[in-house]
Image (cartoon, rainbow, N blue to C red):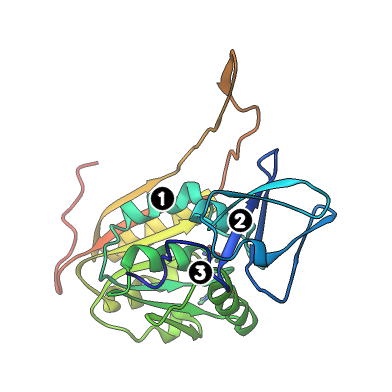
Amino acid sequence: MDINYPRGPLREGEPIILLDRKDREYLARLDRNRPLAIRGGKVLVEELIGRDEGCTVRSSVNEPFLVFRPSLPQLIPNLPRNAQVVYPKDLGPILIWADLFPGARVVEAGVGAGALSMTLLRAIGSSGQLITYEIREDFADMARKTLSKYFGPTPNWILKVGDIETELSEAEVDRVVLDLPEPWKVIDPAWSALKPGGILLSYLPTVIQVKSLVDALRADKRFACIETMETLMRFWHIKGMSVRPQHRMIAHTGFLTSARRLADGEKDIPRAS
Ligand code: SAH
């Protein structure tokens, strides 16, 4: 069994998510020495250890909560954060458009709060390797703590404090996944790091950044299959006869741009339009 995906009864040290009657989420960790203070009451950790996920617990003020191990979409919006995390609606498409697979060797930058890092680690599995570059030491420290607290052991994760633009030193990499403001400065080092056919994927919040990246990829000519997309995800309210989209939605997060590295010495063929 993969160490990152515990199953069976809840154990000490594991992260849990508690849900109240309004489906509000509270992220916590099972620590015997620390009762969980939640909505003006206390939940005893002893009462949870050894129970199955999906159980109900009552706090000292008799409020019921459902308890699960957090899924990634439950965990990520509740992570302690320093930077804007990549949201689940974009994480799903990133996994497909960067074509992640178990065993993949992946380079990522930067770490931020670690939301994308944990998603990539889950996709590549224990036989893969993730090398993450982060320019800010304080962000790297916080992400390391967050992953060990809420994600689990990560023996196949190397977190390097450094500027990926100048310090990317890996070779024979399957995928390069970027969430930083100037990815066009990483095109050349990413080409050198990637295997032929490898995929570069970049997440960017604004159109000007996307244009700069795509123009630079086209001018470089050593990448092809350049595609840019965005994901709109609309949740629905379903209660009795009231079945409709929810009134509010996240209208904008970011754009994904993916491209494939050509073989050594090859240039992209001239485009028809
Ligand atoms: N994907 C992350 C959020 C990343 S925010 C998440 O889902 O949580 C962008 C991060 O890139 C910041 O932490 C920033 O410090 C880092 N960064 C910016 N430029 C960089 C560079 N040239 N090399 C490495 N990290 C960089």
Query: Which is nearer the N-term, disc 3 or disc 2?
Result: 2
Where on the picture, by quarter, is residue 68?
bottom right
- Gap in Å between the C-alphas at discs 2 and 1? 21 Å
Q: Residue at x 39, y 64 (%)?
A: 122
Residue 227 vs residue 44: left or right? Answer: left
- Gap in Å between the C-alphas at discs 3 and 1? 18 Å
Residue 4, which numbered label? none
Residue 24 vs residue 107: left or right? Answer: right
Asked if the residues shown at circle 2 and circle 1 are in contact, with their CB atoms under 8 angstroms apart, the answer is: no
Q: According to the image, label 1 marks what residue?
A: 92
Q: Residue at x 32, y 58 (%)?
A: 98
Q: Nearer the viewer, residue 173 or 56?
A: 56
Q: According to the image, label 3 marks what residue?
A: 151
Q: Residues within 10 Å of mark 1 (few under 14, many from 20)?
A: few
Q: Position of residue 192 (x, y in %)?
A: 27, 78
Compared with residue 241, is residue 228 higher up or lower down, i.e. above or below?
Answer: below
Query: Which is nearer the N-term, disc 3 or disc 1?
Result: 1
Q: Name the amino acid type tagged 1.
A: Gly
Badge 3 element = loop
Q: Nearer the viewer, residue 22 or 255?
A: 22
Q: According to the image, label 2 marks what residue?
A: 17
Q: Name the amino acid type tagged 2.
A: Ile
Badge 1 element = helix
Q: Residues within 10 Å of mark 2 (few under 14, many from 20)?
A: many
Q: Is residue 80 visible?
A: no
Residue 9 vs residue 197: left or right? Answer: right
Q: Position of residue 164 (x, y in %)?
A: 45, 79
